Every structure is written in C-alpha cells, then in structure tokens.
C-alpha cells in the first residue's frame, strides 16, 4: 500500500482487495507504461473513456468477442464491465470510511484485455493528494451519488452513447446494476449488525437525485438465508449480452420471467462466500 494514503483508507482498500470481495484494484505510485500498439490489451488512462473514437474501438472489440455485429452490445457491456470494477472500490471505501476516493478521471487507470473487458483498475496516489472532500467532512448519500454519477460517469456515458447509440436509460441502468452488485458484495461481507445499514444506504443511493431516470432501473430485496442474509437486486434494463452468440440473459435480467428469475437469484446469493469483517461508518449521523 502507498504511504500517501491515510491509514484508515489503506485498511479499507486492503479489506476490499481480499476475499470475499476481491476487488481488482491496484494503488499505483506512477502511471503504468503504455506501449504504442494497435492492440487493446494493456493499461489505459481512464480519460480515454471520455473519447468517442476510443469507445468505438472498445465497443467493437467487445461486440466481436461476443460474436455479435451489434455495436450497442459492446457499448453497454463494456460500460458495465468498467463500472463494476470501479464502483466496488469507490463505494467500498466510502461505506467503510465516510469519504470517497478521488474521482477525477486522470487519477484512474484501467487494464483491458483484447476484447475490451476491464480486468483491473488502478488509482494513482501521488504525495499529499488523496480525498476529494475537505478533511473531516463526510460525504453523504446525495453528494456521493452526484460525484460518482455526474462527475465521473457523466462524460464517460456521454462518449459511450455517442459512439454506440445506446440510450441514457440503458447506460445508467448498467451503471446502476454495477452499483447494486457492489452493495451486495459489501452487504455479504459486513458485520451482522451492519448489514441493515448497508441495505438502507444502498436503497437511498439508488434513489438519489443524481440518477437521470426517475424510474428506478434496479430494485433491492434483502432475503434471509440459513444463518445470514443477502441483498438481491433485479434490473429493469437489459445489458444486451443475450444478443451475443451463445449467451443467455443474466439472472437479474427483466427479460427473464420472474418465476424463473427469482429462484436463480436466490440460489446464486446463497452460494456466494460470506464475511463479517467489514464495518460500516457512512451515514452514522
């Protein structure tokens, strides 16, 4: 870990990186080397995701990997793949410390494979620069949602939409599903007495005013399991992966009838590894 990161943040990030959350996150002392190449695989600065030509390239590679000619599939899935990696680190840090990590695009890197899948994310941690809020100032739900959705994802979604013609509802539905998945991961790692707090914060975050669509694209249910509980989400938008050759709809997809979808979601939740060492600090008042 980097000595320039506050101790409580280092501890929060280390916890997220270990099982059962296993966040694919690296703290970077300096930017990774970028070799001039026509290949997509390797480390890229996240500001590239605000560029329409780069999104056209990434989405085309993602769609090709799914064996579909439809560019919107790669746009939606590529966006969701990146968002899933980023928000687990961002929301996981916030839930444990009350502060967001810096969200400026230039502070983040992503490692892609040849199909445009985000394998890892990296956060640059130069000396003396860490939090995006004033020291000692907690970031509430509305502020965090606005910083993440408007500040970080706003320009990224705009570029992805321009390149691939996906709708705003679909794009932010993919981001919402990634946030929901992150909260579910945090919930199953939280101490028993904190799981209800994770659920409440997740509900409020997904209802925050920063979401552009007033009709929620993700809904939560906390279910009981033997000796524990789990947070399950259902989507109201499809990520389009089912349009790829040999790919079916995701378990949470609205295109799957609920009588089929719900047992699949419960079974999946029951099979995941649980923990109890994550303590929730955010929103304690």
Image (cartoon, rainbow, N blue to C red):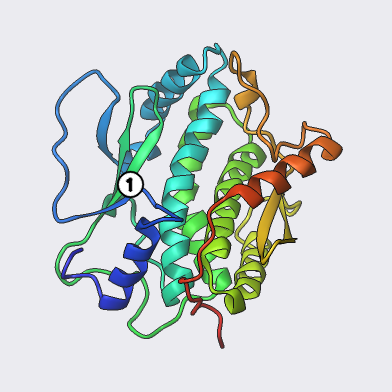
Query: For residue 119, which quarter of the picture?
Result: top left
Asked if residue 138 shows in the view, the reply is: yes
Depth check, front residue: 143 or 261? 261
Query: For residue 220, which quarter of the picture?
Result: bottom right
* 262 lies above or below 91: above
Q: Give the labeled residue for mark 1.
A: 121
Mark 1 lies on a secondary structure that is strand
Query: For residue 94, which quarter of the picture?
Result: bottom left
Q: How many marks?
A: 1
Q: Residue at x 30, y 24 (%)?
A: 40
Q: Answer left or right for 39 relative to 134.
A: left
Asked if residue 208 shows in the view, the reply is: no
* 103 lies above or below 119: below
**Residue 264 rendering spot, x and y as whole percentages:** 73, 40
Q: Quadrant of the N terminus?
A: bottom left
Mark 1, other Cα within 10 Å: few <14 / some 14–19 / many ≥20 = many
Q: Quadrant of the C terminus?
A: bottom right
**Residue 83 rendering spot, x and y as whole percentages:** 47, 45
Q: Residue at x 86, y 39 (%)?
A: 259
* 43 lies above or below 175: above
Q: Answer left or right for 220 relative to 71.
A: right
């Amino acid at each position: 870990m980097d000595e320039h990161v506050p101790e409580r943040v280092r501890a929060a990030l280390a916890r997220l990186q270990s099982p059962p959350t296993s966040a694919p996150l690296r703290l970077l002392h300096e930017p990774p080397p970028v070799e001039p190449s026509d290949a997509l695989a390797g480390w890229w600065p996240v500001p590239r995701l605000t560029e329409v030509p780069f999104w056209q390239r990434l989405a085309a590679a993602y769609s090709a990997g799914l064996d579909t000619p439809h560019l919107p599939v790669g746009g939606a899935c590529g966006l969701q793949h990146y968002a899933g990696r980023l928000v687990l680190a961002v929301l996981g840090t916030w839930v444990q410390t009350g502060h967001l990590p810096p969200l400026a695009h230039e502070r983040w890197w992503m490692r892609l494979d040849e199909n445009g899948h985000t394998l890892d994310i990296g956060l640059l941690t130069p000396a003396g620069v860490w939090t995006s809020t004033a020291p000692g100032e907690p970031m509430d739900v509305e502020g965090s949602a606005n910083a993440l959705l408007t500040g970080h994802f706003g320009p990224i979604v705009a570029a992805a939409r321009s390149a691939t013609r996906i709708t705003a509802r679909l794009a932010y539905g993919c981001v919402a599903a990634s946030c929901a998945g992150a909260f579910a991961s945090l919930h199953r790692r939280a101490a028993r007495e904190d799981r209800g707090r994770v659920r409440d914060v997740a509900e409020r975050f997904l209802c925050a005013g920063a979401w552009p669509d007033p009709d929620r694209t993700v809904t939560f249910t906390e279910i009981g399991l033997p000796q524990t509980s789990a947070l399950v989400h259902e989507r109201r938008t499809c990520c389009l992966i089912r349009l790829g050759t040999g790919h079916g709809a995701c378990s949470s997809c609205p295109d799957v009838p609920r009588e089929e979808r719900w047992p699949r979601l419960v079974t999946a939740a029951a099979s995941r590894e649980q923990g109890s060492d994550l303590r929730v600090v955010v929103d304690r008042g």
